[in-house]
Structures are given as structure tokens and as C-alpha cells.
């Protein structure tokens, strides 16, 4: 089989859906749209792994690629998980049931499909895709830090074109980096707490869970009579972005706090990593351009770089966010195949 005849598959596992893609040996994606199926993670590991198998078969059918041409599969799931793809012993964002705790999802999929599976968490996969798309053929010459804002705050650190995984596979968990709170919190605002047990980390502010748990309850006290006060807090938190896009003053205060937290996080990253680029992804990217640029400008205002760093680095958005995880996973698989051949 010649190089031009083989492909790799990327599988992005989420709380409700899997997304899949196919990448050929020359680095070309064979599909430019979401190819999804239900992830069924709430039905337990056995059914969820079967759903990943279905995603694999479906994307091959969509692209016309033959299974015999597949050299490897890239897989990502929400963390925390080990570098080898073992879900944390305490569970993870979408894997709260006991049967998921300590489950080796990478090996389970590898045994089911009979192909090598290369694992990353979803933040790392999106970070790798952002890095590769931004730097192209020069990706190996640069480093980057990515923050992905969602239910939690994921992220990834890429050095010389490769994801930094760390000893336990949990490097790049930017959401759980503690950030300075002085000047960030409003008058009388309590120190925000995170679902992980920390207080004052980035995720406790810059995430949907941070809005629901910390920001919205406080800001509703500052805007008495706001209509979101009559909505159940979990639903109200999901509506904040819509209100912000419509220039609602309270919602803008919430997103301004989130932007400030992300800027402080990138400032910390500048001092321990000094990357070539800072990438921002998540729901805020999937907003109208006017709001998106306003939010990015607020992140920039709060990212304090030295003059030399400011000249050398860029702040940009993660492209193709809905597809970034699957595509980053495919890139990791492609890199593994190429490295194994050398």
C-alpha cells in the first residue's frame, strides 16, 4: 500500500454526540462538515464504545474510504484522563457513573476495531488543530497555549508542534490554574469555587459552570429585577450568552469578567511557556462577529505581555470549533503513523 492510499480517522467523543473525520496521508481532510452520531455515554462504557464503532463505520461510508486503508484512529474524550486514555478514578465531565471510573476507553476501542488508537483529551485535540491550522508547515517551529471555554475550561499546550501531556497525562488543564482575584471580582463578590474542589481557579469564572455556580448568582444581586432572576439558574446560565449578544448590561458584565480571567490565565502562561500564539475557543467563538471581537479585545486588554512577547506572539480564535476535536485527533494519529514509519 502506497502512502497515497492510506488514511487515519479522528473520533471526537462528547457528552451527547460523537463527531468523526477522515484525514489522508498527505494531510487533507476528506470531509468538511460534521459527521455525527449519538455518543450514548450515559448508557455506560460498553454501549458508548459501540457508538464510537458506529461513528467509525459511518464516516468511512460518508467519505468512501475503505476500512482496509485505515492505519490508525485518533480518539479524544473530555478529561481528566491519563495520557493512555484511562478515565480518572473519580470520573470525568461526561463520565460520572461508577462504571466509567478508571475505565480504559482507548484500549477498549482498540480491541473492538483491531486498529491502533491514539488518545488525547478534547482540549488537547482542539489545541493541536488550532496550532496546526495557524502555523501550517511551520507548526514544528512554534509553541502555543489554547483555552477552550465550555461547560468547564479545557485547554492544551503545544510545544514544537506536539501536545505536552505531562507525567500523568494531565498537562494543559488550564481551567484549574489559580489566577489572581484582586481587581477581578466585584464589590462583595464571593471567592468563586470550582466543581473540582479548588477556589479561585480559571474555570470557576471562565466556564458555563462558573456562570451558573458563581457569576450569575452574584450579578443578579447587582441587577435586582432582572428577568433572568425568574428563570431556573441552570437554564438562566445558558441564556446569558444570548443576552450578552443583545448588549444586556448584566450579561456583558459577566462576559467581561470571563474575559479578564482568561487574560490573566494567558498572562501566567506567558511567564511559564512564552508561546508563539494564544488560542481561544468555545461557545464565545460561535457568536456574531461584533460580540466575538469585543470579547477577544477584552481578553487582549487583560493579557499582560512584555514588549518583546507582544511583538512575537499572536492571540487568535480556534477555527472550525465544532470539528476541531475530531480533526486534532486525526492529526495526532497521522503524526503517530509517520513517526512509526521512521
Image (cartoon, helix red, strand yellow):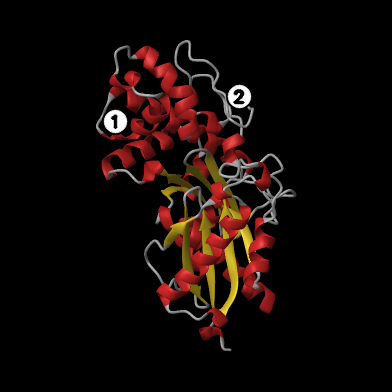
Q: According to the image, label 2 marks what residue?
A: 199
- Residue 319 position in % (x across, y down): 41, 55
Measure the C-alpha gap from mark 2 to mark 1.
27 Å
For the residue labelled by badge 2, is the local secondary structure a helix, a strand or a loop?
loop
Q: Identify the image quadrant of the C terminus.
A: bottom right
Task: Give the residue furthest to the left.
Answer: 246
Q: Which mark is residue 243?
A: 1
Residue at x 56% of width, y 84% of height:
3
Label 2 close to label 1 by CB (< 8 Å): no
Residue at x 49% of width, y 32% of height:
209
Is residue 260 depicted above or below 173 in this figure?
above
Question: Could you say which is closer to the camera, residue 214 or residue 44?
Answer: 44
Q: Is residue 197 left or right of residue 24?
A: right
- Residue 319 visible within the image: no
Question: Could you say which is closer to the camera, residue 315 or residue 57?
Answer: 57
Classed neighbour count for the residue bearing mark 1: other residues with Cα under 10 Å, few (<14), some (14–19), many (≥20): some
Q: Identify the image quadrant of the N terminus.
A: bottom right
- Residue 10 position in % (x across, y down): 52, 65
- Residue 227 position in % (x across, y down): 28, 20
Question: Could you say which is closer to the camera, residue 141 or residue 249?
Answer: 249
Question: Could you say which is closer to the camera, residue 118 or residue 299?
Answer: 118
Amino acid at each position: 500500500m502506497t502512502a497515497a492510499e492510506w488514511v487515519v480517522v479522528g473520533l471526537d467523543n462528547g457528552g451527547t454526540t460523537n463527531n468523526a473525520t477522515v484525514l489522508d496521508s498527505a494531510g487533507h481532510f476528506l470531509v468538511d462538515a460534521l459527521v455525527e452520531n449519538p455518543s450514548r455515554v450515559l448508557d455506560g462504557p460498553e454501549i458508548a464504545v459501540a457508538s464510537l464503532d458506529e461513528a467509525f463505520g459511518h464516516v468511512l461510508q460518508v467519505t468512501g474510504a475503505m476500512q482496509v486503508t485505515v492505519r490508525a484512529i485518533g480518539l479524544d474524550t473530555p478529561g481528566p484522563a491519563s495520557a493512555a486514555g484511562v478515565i480518572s478514578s473519580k470520573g470525568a465531565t461526561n463520565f460520572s457513573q461508577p462504571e466509567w471510573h478508571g475505565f480504559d476507553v482507548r484500549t477498549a476501542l482498540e480491541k473492538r476495531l483491531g486498529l491502533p488508537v491514539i488518545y488525547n483529551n478534547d482540549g488537547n485535540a482542539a489545541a493541536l488543530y488550532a496550532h496546526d491550522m495557524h502555523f501550517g508547515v511551520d507548526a514544528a517551529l512554534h509553541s502555543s497555549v489554547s483555552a477552550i471555554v465550555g461547560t468547564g475550561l479545557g485547554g492544551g499546550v503545544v510545544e514544537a508542534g506536539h501536545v505536552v501531556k505531562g507525567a500523568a497525562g494531565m498537562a494543559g488543564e488550564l481551567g484549574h490554574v489559580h489566577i489572581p482575584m484582586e481587581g477581578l471580582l466585584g464589590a462583595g463578590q464571593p471567592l468563586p469555587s470550582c466543581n473540582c474542589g479548588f477556589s479561585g481557579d480559571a474555570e470557576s469564572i471562565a466556564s458555563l459552570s462558573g456562570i451558573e455556580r458563581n457569576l450569575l448568582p452574584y450579578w443578579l444581586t447587582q441587577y435586582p429585577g432582572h428577568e433572568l432572576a425568574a428563570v431556573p439558574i441552570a437554564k438562566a446560565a445558558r441564556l446569558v450568552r444570548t443576552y450578552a449578544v443583545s448588549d444586556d448590561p448584566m450579561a456583558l458584565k459577566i462576559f467581561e469578567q470571563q474575559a479578564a480571567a482568561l487574560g490573566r490565565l494567558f498572562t501566567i502562561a506567558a511567564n511559564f511557556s512564552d508561546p508563539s500564539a494564544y488560542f481561544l475557543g468555545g461557545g464565545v467563538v460561535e457568536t456574531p462577529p461584533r460580540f466575538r471581537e469585543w470579547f477577544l479585545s477584552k481578553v487582549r486588554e487583560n493579557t499582560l505581555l512584555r514588549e518583546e512577547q507582544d511583538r512575537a506572539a499572536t492571540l487568535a480564535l480556534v477555527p472550525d470549533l465544532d470539528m476541531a476535536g475530531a480533526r486534532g485527533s486525526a492529526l495526532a494519529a497521522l503524526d503517530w503513523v509517520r513517526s512509526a514509519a521512521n
